[in-house]
Amino acid sequence: MAKKQTSTILESAVVKDGILSLNGVEMQQIIEKCEGCDRVVTHETGGKYCASYAQPAAKWGRKACNFATHVRAEVDTTGKVKVNPLKASKRAARGR
């Protein structure tokens, strides 16, 4: 279980009109998929933010966030590997 931490990273952050801004960058709150990550920090306003990325929802757009500490990368165990046909023909010609 990830501990809730208040980070020194957000000490210089400014809250204006309900938006947290750090060095001119608007920080967005984390999404559900970020829960349990070690990079989640809590601001004094009560919001939870990612210490590594300003827009955490964008990092989860395609697959898992590459900064996530609570998610393991999936390994393809089906054995089907995508091979470039040009490289395959060159390897076959060399006898590999």
Image: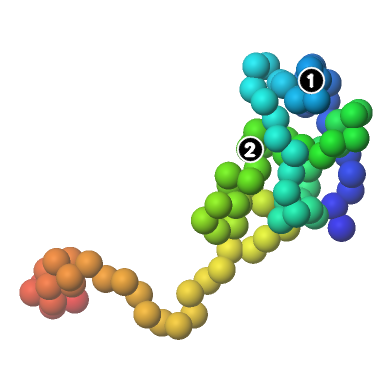
Q: Is residue 70 above or below residue 50?
A: below
Q: Secondary structure at mark 1?
A: loop
The x, y position of residue 86, in whole percent, is 14, 66
Q: CA distance from mark 1 to mark 2?
A: 18 Å
State the residue in front, 75 or 94.
75
Q: Quadrant of the C terminus?
A: bottom left
Instruction: Name the residue at the left extreme.
Output: 93
Q: Quadrant of the N terminus?
A: bottom right
Hey, what amino acid is under mark 2?
Answer: Gln
Q: Is residue 66 visible?
A: no
Q: Residue at x 17, y 70 (%)?
A: 85
State the residue in front, 54 or 5.
54
Of label 1 and label 2, which has the lower sequence position?
1
Q: Residue at x 59, y 57 (%)?
A: 64
Q: Is residue 48 visible?
A: yes
Q: Is residue 94 above or below residue 46?
A: below
State the residue in front, 58 or 89.
58
Would residue 79 appear left or right of 49 to someone viewing this image?
A: left
The x, y position of residue 87, in whole percent, is 17, 66
Circle 1 is placed at which residue position? 17
In the picture, residue 91 is in which quadrant?
bottom left
Q: Please tell me how crowded label 2 is: few (under 14), some (14-19), or many (20+) other residues with Cα within 10 Å.
A: some
- Disc on res. 55: 2
Would residue 54 appear left or right of 93 to someone viewing this image?
A: right
Q: Is residue 61 above or below residue 48?
A: below
Q: Residue at x 35, y 75 (%)?
A: 81
